[in-house]
Image (tube, rainbow, N blue to C red):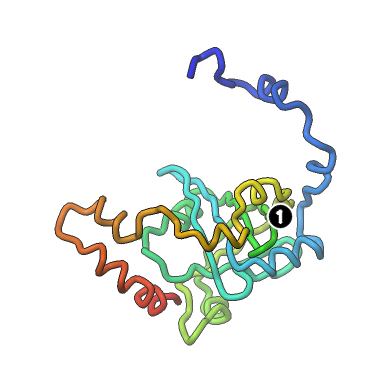
Amino acid sequence: MTKEHIVTDIDQLETLYGEAMPRAITKELRHLNSEYRAFVEAAPFMAVATVGSEGLDCSPRGDRGSVVRVVDEKTIQFADRRGNNRLDTLRNIVQDNRIGLLFLVPGVSETMRLNGRATISTAPDLLASFSVEGKTPKSVVEVTIDQAYFQCSKALFRSGIWDLENQLVEPNVPTAGEMLQATIDNHFDPDEYDKTSQKRNLAELW
């Protein structure tokens, strides 16, 4: 990669790509209208992007039914369910409350993007309202929406992510156990880890 081919300023970038399509601008709202709300409430999965002093983070989130609760046209909430306690997302929110969310609905090729500002709450009544199977999350993240817009279907069409034939093919990727073994110095049994992982994950889901 030569220096002369590196894009270094906004004018150069905009000259390269040209103006945005008008609909790409007008579809951006500062709130959830009824259509955007319906999309968000149908999504059981989202990616959460944050930034803090230690860098960037993009983490997956999933939940039964809708991954978030829509409080009103400017506010959504989601539970921080059990995880690995790295707390990358939450650490970043404490330091810098900017947040970006990308929602996916199985079988739908459009995605929904929300950008806003997040706060972390441990209010007992709020935690209790997110309880599943008698287990409450340690915190709930509330997001005030600054931008809301859907992304067209090109990326998911290109990837073929929802195509049945792609889901039936055995993926040629290492297992979780194999990836852990590559990062651990002491003795570790990847086969045993993979054998018990599904049972362990289900037991620790909430």
* Image quarter (top left, top right, bottom left or bottom right) of the C terminus: bottom left
Relative to residue 154, is residue 53 drawn left or right? Answer: left
Residue at label 1? 110
Q: From this view, report whether residue 202 is shown above or below residue 178.
A: below
Task: Name the residue furthest left.
Answer: 187
State whether residue 12 is above or below residue 125: above
* Secondary-structure class at tag 1: loop
Please indicate whether residue 108 sits to the left or right of residue 181 in the image. Answer: right
Q: Residue at x 70, y 51 (%)?
A: 146
Q: Quadrant of residue 66?
A: bottom right
Q: Nearer the viewer, residue 204 or 74?
A: 204
Residue 69 percent across, percent down from the top left: 65, 71
Q: Residue at x 58, y 67 (%)?
A: 78
Image location (x, y in percent) of residue 173: 40, 53
Asked if residue 129 lies left or right of residue 17, the reply is left
Question: In this view, which residue lies farthest toward the bottom?
Answer: 134
Q: Across the whole image, how many numbered discs are drawn on residues?
A: 1
Q: Residues within 10 Å of mark 1 (few under 14, many from 20)?
A: some
Front one among 54 and 62: 62
Badge 1 amino acid: Glu
Q: Position of residue 155 (x, y in %)?
A: 65, 46
Does residue 155 sit above or below 87 in this rendering? above
Residue 5 rendering spot, x and y as whole percentages: 56, 17
x 72%, y 21%: residue: 15
